[in-house]
Image (cartoon, grey):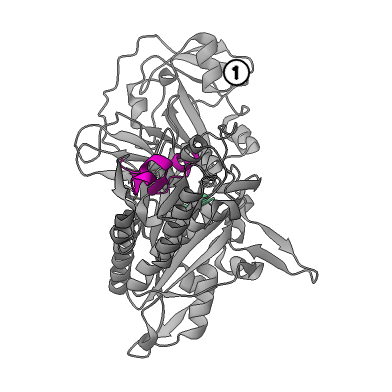
Amino acid sequence: MRWSQTLIPTMRDTPKDAEAASHKLALRAGLIRQLSSGVYSYLPLGFRVLRKVLELVRREMLAAGAEEVLLPALHPAEIWKKSGRFETLGEDKISFKNRAGMEFVLGPTHEEVITELVGGSVKSFRSLPVTLFQIQTKFRDEARPRFGVIRTKEFIMKDAYSFDIDEAGLDKNYQKMSEAYKKIFTNCGLSFQIVSADPGLMGGKMSQEFMVICPYGEDRVARSQGDYLASQDIAERKDPGLKTPEAKSAKPEPFDTPNLRTIDEISNKFNIAPGRILKTLIYMADDQPIAALVTGDSEVNENKLKRLAEASRIRQASNEEVRNATGAPVGFAGPIGLKLPLYADWDVVGIADGVTGANEKDKHFKGVSFGRDFQPKVLGDIRYVKDGDDAPDGNGKLELTTTMEVGHIFKLGTRYSESIGAHFLDESGVLKPMIMGCYGIGVNRILAAVIEEHHDESGIKWPKSIAPFEFEIITVNQGDETIVAAAEKIYRELSDAGREVLYDDRDERAGVKFKDADLIGIPMRIVIGERNLKEGNVEVKDRLSGESRVIPLDALLPTYAGTQV
Ligand code: ATP
Ligand code: MG
């Protein structure tokens, strides 16, 4: 491809709103442009990278025995209602009515559609197992699209679904997919970790996330000094074994806190460390109010609370429910005298001279002591883990890292085969629901993740496997006929040999071309300049290692035409 004939609008300056390195570089290198918030166009270089990633993904899916299909993006709302997810999709759902008044959802994922398809087509154990995958655009009205193509409203996903007759079959397919994912991410040049994740969201039994370390990711992973590695969503900690402390005060004393409702407000106004403030949150557990107690520097993990409270559903109480349960508006709840089951985090045991809400508008207590002034119904681990918590496997402290999820694999079980209806007759003629797994990869996110991992201050350093081109030819002076003739020859011969070549044939200063070449990051650069050419040589520079060498023009083709760089 000749630069002059394609569209590579590189930018000198760093775009103002871009924070993540991958976002800045993808814009500056002319890979992407934003159409509206969270909606991007892929330009020729960006789309070439996406296609390379897609080819790698497709190859490994086929090798793992999955067959490709293409499912509709337009889903009748009915099918989402059938699985019960129409509501839970919430505001992320992009839906509308057509002229006949029929409601549609633009597919955010495809468990419902594929289950209906396979359920309608497979009747006997003889046709199972089957694994199908597709590569398609998904639509989610994300509340906060950010960091370029890391979180967008429209993105390409590879989603695969396995259907088995039993758990053993699912285990095998899950393992196969996990192996395929390892190959895909390794081939893309990504360093990744496989992390235990929360299967609850999809209604499954087990799930793992493929995470890359990235400061702009929105996930956090907790790791012990040993093998323990889990998403912060589910990571646990060892009981710190805090002892009930000696109360320093005679009794709790009320004090005025007009309109001070949050931990920050109280902490700032009275100069009290958040760790000494008891946060009391009211939840509805299976429609009954309960109170959760954590220290002011922690966040309640609702899944942990749900487990401790042995509830099947949990949600934060509404303002009115809080008022009914505590007798005070939101922001003034506290454990003293509260007639609700109290679920307290282990941290709370250490509180001797704490501050809590007084269950009265504009009032808090100080001098509050655990044990003396209130007793929880159950003590346990109900908060998100933090850096420095004791690791649950006993191996030192937990360390948290910011990561980005690039892939996710789930054992779904019968969640969808039962609700949508995908049954088969087993060997003895008994009708059973199929056992499902689902496996997703965010293709656009891979592009961003690879840039995050492979760049320097001058630009992108594409791994060879997914680079938009293998070679870039640069003429130092496009006005010099000998240089141009040599460039044309190399361009033609390498292209004829099946190599992917970008020829920077612009009439630009050499400095501009070199800067752009560093920015767009093609692995091999062939520089044709007057001085080298006089001796029959060209310069070849490796963008990854930075090494450059001068080789005879005649040696170029034999060296590079046959093998992929
Ligand atoms: P996240 O927690 O980041 O929102 P998710 O759990 O909603 O991800 P899945 O439904 O498991 O994601 O989708 C599979 C893959 O699709 C994810 O691993 C991720 O790589 C990608 N993905 C999900 N949402 C987006 C998005 N809004 N923009 C780009 N890629 C996305
Ligand atoms: Mg999401």
Judge left or right: residue 245 versus residue 490: left
Q: How far from the left and from the top, in percent, is residue 79?
A: 60, 70
Position of residue 204 relative to residue 18, above or below, is below
Q: Which residues are magenta?
A: 516-545
Image quarter hosting the C terminus: bottom left
Does 177 appear above or below 371? below
Compare residues 337 and 386 and report the one nearer the observer: 386
Taking the spot 47% from the left edge, 46% from the top edge, the residue there is 475
- State the image coordinates of residue 350 (x, y, percent, origin top left): 33, 22
Residue 541: quarter of image: top left
Task: Please name whichever residue, 238 or 163, is drawn nearer the observer in this view of the structure.
Answer: 163
Tell me what residue is drawn at x 38 percent, y 46 percent: 533
Residue 143 in sight in this render: yes
Q: 324 or 394: nearer the eye? A: 394
Q: Name the secondary structure under disc 1.
A: loop
**Residue 120, position as x, y percentages in the image:** 52, 83
Q: Is residue 310 magenta?
A: no
Residue 136 percent across, percent down from the top left: 54, 65
Amino acid type, label 1? Leu
Residue at left offset 33%, top offset 90%: 428
Q: Residues within 10 Å of mark 1 (few under 14, many from 20)?
A: some
Relative to 518, 289 lies left or right: right
Residue 424 drawn above or below residue 420:
below
Q: Residue furthest right?
A: 99
Q: According to the image, label 1 marks what residue? A: 260
Tally of numbered tags: 1
Is residue 532 highlighted in magenta? yes
Q: Left or right: where does residue 343 sit relative to residue 147?
A: left
Residue behind label 1 places its C-beta within 8 angstroms of ligand 1: no
**Residue 301 visible in the displayed image:** no
